Amino acid sequence: MLHYSVYPNKNTKEWVTFVHGAGGSSSIWYKQLRDFKKHFNILLLDLRGHGNSKLNLKQAFNDKYTFDSITDDIVEVIEHEKIESSHFIGISLGTILIRNLAEKYPQKVDSMIMGGAVMKLNFRSQVLMRLGIICKSIVPYLWLYKFFAFIIMPNRNHKESRLLFVREAKKLYQKEFIRWFRLTSEINPLLRFFRSADIKIPTLYVMGEEDYLFLPSIRKIVKAHTKSELFVVENCGHVVNVEKPEIFNTATIDYLNGLAR
């Protein structure tokens, strides 16, 4: 089972589950934890091979890495904690897992907050992925990760986010990175399906206005999906919860509290 932490709040029955992206860990939510604990029960987890879940790598290496299997890792924790349903907050690749979870287990998802959401790979993104697939076995994974981090978060004001993700990625093993990278082979058809299917679960996309790779596709999705909303954070890049935590926390907590009214 994944490593996870629970922060109960006796004043509410509502849960918020945080899902980090590839190369990160639950530690990337450190700027959210204090504010969210005041309002909700909190579940923080480390995806397989990340953070403290890397202690279970022997078992994980024996399993096939697919978006479905990694999604089921999350569900296993939720069911173990007897959480009937939860709000889900994700960043970057974590948003794909949340969207997949909502497709497979909609009864478990009260709402989705998608930070730096990845719902389409543009031409530049697809070229980068193909380059990574070619080089993944011959180039040290950290070089690739630093390169991708710079492409996704290029500006000076993105530096904190970029360094945070590179620092977390250093904790991965080369084999683990390659296993995650292989997921890219199934990402395009999955994202195409997500864009076409209006799942009708309340969804807030929180995107930086400088998230040039991914923001344009999210604008189109929000126009097409009936229960989706978009909140754009000015002077901000891909990792909105790290770059602009006060704005991110206020916008997302207000959104969740509004759903309860």
Image (tube, rainbow, N blue to C red):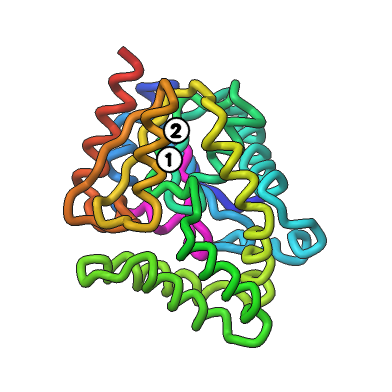
Which amino acid lies under the numbered mark 2 shown in the image of this protein?
Met
Asked if the residue at tag 2 contacts the one at tag 1, i.e. Cβ–Cβ closer than 8 Å, the answer is yes
Q: Residue at x 68, y 82 (%)?
A: 137
Q: Relative to the observer, which residue lies in front, 118 or 81?
A: 118
Of mark 1 and mark 2, the one earlier in the sequence is 1
Q: What residue is disc 2 on?
A: 112
Q: Where residue 164 is drawn, which disc sits there?
A: none
- Report the disc number at residue 89: 1
Rendered location of residue 115, percent (x, y)? 37, 46
Above or below: residue 207 compared with residue 239? above
Residue 8 x, y percent position in the rendering: 43, 34
Which SS class for mark 2? strand
- Is 117 displayed left or right of 232 in the figure? right
Q: Up-down: is 170 above or below 55?
A: below
The reply to whether the magenta stretch includes residue 74 is no
Residue visible at 32% across and 56% down in the picture: 211
Query: In the current view of this chain or complex, which residue is farthest to the front?
Result: 123
Q: Amino acid at mark 1?
A: Ile
